[in-house]
Image (cartoon, rainbow, N blue to C red):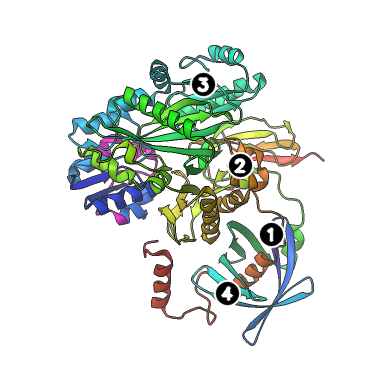
Amino acid sequence: MFKKILIANRGEIAVRIIRACRELGIATVAVYSDADRDALHVMLADEAYHIGPSKPSESYLVGEKVVAAAKKSGAEAIHPGFGFLSENEAFAELCEKEGVVFIGPSAEAIRLMGDKVTARKIAREAKIPLVPGSEGAVSDVEASRVAKKIGYPVMIKASAGGGGKGMRLVNSKENFESSLRMARSEAFSSFGDDSVFIEKFIQQPRHVEVQVLGDRHGNLLHLFERECSIQRRHQKVIEEAPSGFISQKTRKNMCEVALRIAKAVDYFGAGTVEFIMDQEENFYFLEMNTRVQVEHPVTEMITGIDIVKWMIRIASGEKLPFKQSSIKMQGHALECRVYAEDPATNFLPSPGPLHYVRAPSGPGVRDDSSVYSGCEITSFYDPMLSKLVVWGNSREDAVDRMLSALREYVVLGVRTNLGFLIRMMRDPEFRKAQIDTGFIERHPELLVPEESDPEVILMAAAVAMNGGSNQIAQGKTASSSGWKLFARRVGVSGNPLL
Amino acid sequence: MTYTFKLGNKTYKVGFEEKEGLSLFSIDDEQKEIEFLRIDESTYSILVDNQSITVGIFREGKKIQVFHEGDLYELEAVSGRDASQAEGTGSLNITAPMHSRVVKILKKQGDSVEVGDSVIVVEAMKMESELKASASGTVKEIRVKEGETVEKDSVLVALSDSE
């Protein structure tokens, strides 16, 4: 096993990986940009190396700086997390060349699955069902020809894309040209590559994906599916495991197909095979993500398997000790991504000082977070504050538990999607698992609070005027001793750093 | 003490008196006894008619944030004079929602715009957003160039209304 690992990431995933390392008795090395000197991952790690300015392209995306920090610190391996360098084959190769273990699949698997066009080709050869569309990247002329042939609505997607960037849905011929221009420009600014491909748009599609885990000794297993159909701007917001929709037969088929495509690229490490599914449970291969997913906790909750720890063990050469038949799923898990964004303005990010945060707790509640009262949400990085995860005996129990936990969350300073998430948990269609990727667009009423009597809010405002501003009010405090206050805060959050 | 609060586009007048350890809150001539306790720097527990309400509060001068059941409400305590001004129409100008970069300007000076028309495309956090006109009018002045980096709340395009 490794003695020291560098985490080439920031935010909650860096914190998540550091925690896994600490549990495994592995020393941790953080890297950070100018904006992240006060970040939680820096505080939790044993060592921290500054790797440059706040812009990701000058720090977290510079492989040479990350590898140099690993060598200087004596770290034997690098965990890339998600985003940044996690699906960059050149970085995986650089690690190998410099004698540092890349915690992930082979550079070859990243290359094959990273380019969506190549991935589709491999899927076609492995007889995996695919959505109709262009065979590879297309010119503007070809793009509109393909769109016409397969019929609107169509999707324009960045060849090098991910996370919804450089992606556009086009409903009619009239909007095609402007959407194509926007998709190319977004693709170029996000990935430095403006090539796009065209795909048929499935009506009311569901997003279902299969988690796979393979070791370097040829063992390859699946950890069942996750459904991530609740999305905004083509990015996931609420994820769950298992899907509340598919039949046992579809589950079995889908997991087998996922293993087939993973096998086609000799996959090892943790990976996710994403499918788009129509309302008849027909599923088509979308892409394979060759890294840990944001939503991996829901799978951990229903299988009891710690995916991040296994990624580390696999990279160090360990064999998976369990068989497919011994992996069982139990109960239902939900994850809500808590974002600093404003649902009322089409989910625009809401960076700024985070004055105060109090996270929920209680049975079956897990909050994977990287923020604390007084930290700053900068516009340099993704505005995700935390991932609130719950487990319940059934989907219904999990939804109720999530609702209860969300109602305990308090965030002041930046706008968040918490109110929206609460309204989601109360929505009758969501509760019946009648969801698809167009759900949020169809339910604009969930974006803003219902018009209600503002009495409580005005009462609170009057209290605010009488309760002082930035310091604890004189006289009317719950406890006057600083130590008691500190103890109370620690008691609430369980962690003085939070 | 009477306070006037602006919440959204509405203003409310509320009364608040402290008497012998209790507070009297009134709105629209209805008075309620409330008791409040500050739990930590931003958490308040309010008891009213034996209902227990927990809110998050952050105040900087006149600006107040109240967090309740997942939603953040931004209020402003306004004096009488400010209150009458607040009732006037808001600016039609298009401002930057955050620190961002101007990607494309879709209108030019003198163009007329309808409510909901896209006027300018900005990019932040690698995400492009089209900013739309909140009312119909005419483009009076374009104050930025494509590629320029702009600060939150800076005016990008000045619009004048159709009258």
Say which of marks 2 and 1 sits in front.
2
Is any part of residue B149 visible from this angle?
A: no
At label 1, the amino acid type is: Leu
**Residue A131 disc label:** 3
Residue bearing the label numbered 4: A467
Contact check, label 2 and label 1, Cβ < 8 Å: no
Say which of marks 3 and 1 sits in front.
3
Say which of marks 4 and 2 sits in front.
2
Report the Cα–Cα distance between label 2 and label 1: 21 Å
Is any part of residue B7 visible from this angle?
A: yes
Range of magenta residues = A44-67
Depth check: A127 or A459 in front? A127
At label 2, the amino acid type is: Asn
Q: Dot 2: what SS?
A: loop
Q: Position of residue B113 (x, y in %)?
A: 73, 33
At label 3, the amino acid type is: Val
Contact check, label 3 and label 1, Cβ < 8 Å: no
Q: Dot 1: what SS?
A: strand
- Quick check: B42 left or right of A450? left
Report the Cα–Cα distance between label 4 and label 2: 34 Å
